[in-house]
Amino acid sequence: MNRFLGRPWQQDYGTARDLVFPIGIIDRPFKHDQPPWTVDTSGPGANVLILGAGGSGKTTALQTLICAAALTHTPEQIQFYCLAYSSTALTTVAGLPHVGEVAGPTDPYGVRRTVAELLALVRERKRTFLEYGIASMEVFRRRRFGGEPGPVPNDGFGDVYLVVDNYRALAEENEVLIEQVNVIINQGPSFGVHVVVTADRESELRPPVRSGFGSRVELRLAAVEDAKLVRSRFAKDVPVKPGRGMVAVNYVRLDADPQSGLHTLVARPALASTPDNRFESDSIVEAVSRVASGQAPPVRRLPATFGIDQLREIAAQDTRQGVGAGGIAWAISELDLSPVYLNFAENAHLMVTGRRECGRTTTLATIMSEIGRLYAPGATSAPQPPAGQPSAQVWLVDPRRQLLTTLGSDYVEKFAYNLDGVQAMMGELAAVLAGREPPPGLSAEELLSRSWWSGPEIFLIVDDIQQLPAGFDSPLHKAAPWVTRAADVGLHVIVTRTFGGWSSAGSDPMLRALAQANAPLLVMDADPDEGFIRGKMKGGPLPRGRGLLMAEDTGVFVQVAATEIRK
């Protein structure tokens, strides 16, 4: 480091204005020198790919890069957020003030929140850069750290690095997350969010992002055909020693092939005063902590429980467009910690599944509580609602009888908890919906205004649908045909089911109709061995109240707001 800077690193600490980090040395035998091996993460080199076979020193290279950045830049200028899927070595840099998070497979929530936080930063900077007239990250850096006049977003970040140690392991564990990481790889550099990944083979990267890495570190390769810095026949010459690699010849030598390569060695991520066999970064952490001030913003995490009152406070301040704001708020998104609504402009229904005690019934209780807050009572016995206020009528199937008192009789038109009761209730509901069917010959304006009927919105809420017969014996088959025509008749269906045997859920006519209507599906605590649920998305173990909300071909993790229910 001192060789690279030309001075002790503590001297004029944090005055670097580039994003060039020394990670080792290059051996140049014909020039009889060993200059620093650097990685330039500014401009087109913003994202970094570290390739190497198992045991080649990829994680050590990550440690060294992070330590080098911490020795040259302040925690205000750069921040690191690490996903450690290869080993626990990255935890030794967690104490650096530049490191906001180190999370791994034993902390899946921390991993999700880390990715979500940086994806939210990319989206926020898209908006604020436009608002503040920031044309590029160069302008941002000059304004933020170079004294150039002009406004900058007050997001608390400088240049941010998402570090993914073992891209393939993350991709195999979580399809939703790897797609979010890929978005950051492709869109993040323009807004100062970099991605540094390690991989055994370049083919492990998803095709859309393989060209997204402008900086490349090649250690001893698992397959020499992956070599791009040097010719593959020279890549074979890298010794089987951790930290060794090759780069292209970086000076002019007559009659020499630039791709014949120069040998490299990754620096040990520790101070020179430590033993040669010590690769933990504690010494760097201690030294940097003495001279650096400030701390990288930590990753925000949701509490284990999140109450409906807390959610309503946040929803009251929500001014976003097109997300259903002002409607039924029932969860908070892990992506940006914003409320999640039943957005009836997109879909009228919701399915919820998960294992025992995951919070399925609580989800229904929360939604019913919101119905009572936003809608006037709409049961036949209720008085006429105030002019201009929508009303709601609930038809409740509750085999365990835990939701019977969540709403009063002025909302609940009918409820049933056994097979005979459900059959009778579905016959009555089908008759009500048939009376709302649009007659032939309506104009476009009449269809859009839904003027052929008036009355409350109807909510069919079914808890534990697996307790009812499926197939042709299902008592819900009379109401199922109306699911795909819900907008015409003012119907909303919200159903819960246990997760076991989800692959056979299509035998139930109601669940099949909801799937045909592309109803959002909330998968709470689940068994990943059940296979893909939608597209390439699987369920997995989750704490109570948390779930993966699948809509169309996208998924986002949410925390359902807790509401007291009858036990």
Image (cartoon, grey):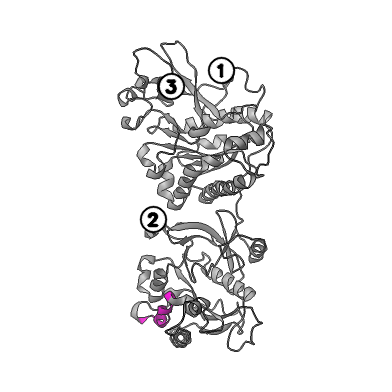
Looking at the image, residue 154 sits to the left or right of residue 349; the answer is right
* Main secondary-structure element of the magenta-colored stretch: helix
* Disc ID at residue 3: 1
Rounded to the nearest angstrom, the CA distance separating label 3 from label 1 is 16 Å
Relative to the observer, which residue lies in front, 466 or 559?
A: 559
Q: Amino acid at mark 3?
A: Thr
The first of marks 3 and 1 along the sequence is 1
Which residue, given by chain and number where applicable, does mark 2 sit on?
Answer: 536
Rounded to the nearest angstrom, the CA distance separating label 1 from label 2 is 49 Å
| Magenta-colored span | 473-484
Using the rendered view, name the quadrant where residue 422 is placed: bottom left
Which residue, given by chain and number where applicable, does mark 3 sit on?
Answer: 264
Q: Is residue 557 placed above or below 53 in the rendered structure?
A: below
Rounded to the nearest angstrom, the CA distance separating label 2 from label 3 is 40 Å
Q: Quadrant of the C terminus?
A: bottom right
* Res 304 visible: yes
Q: Quadrant of the N terminus?
A: top right
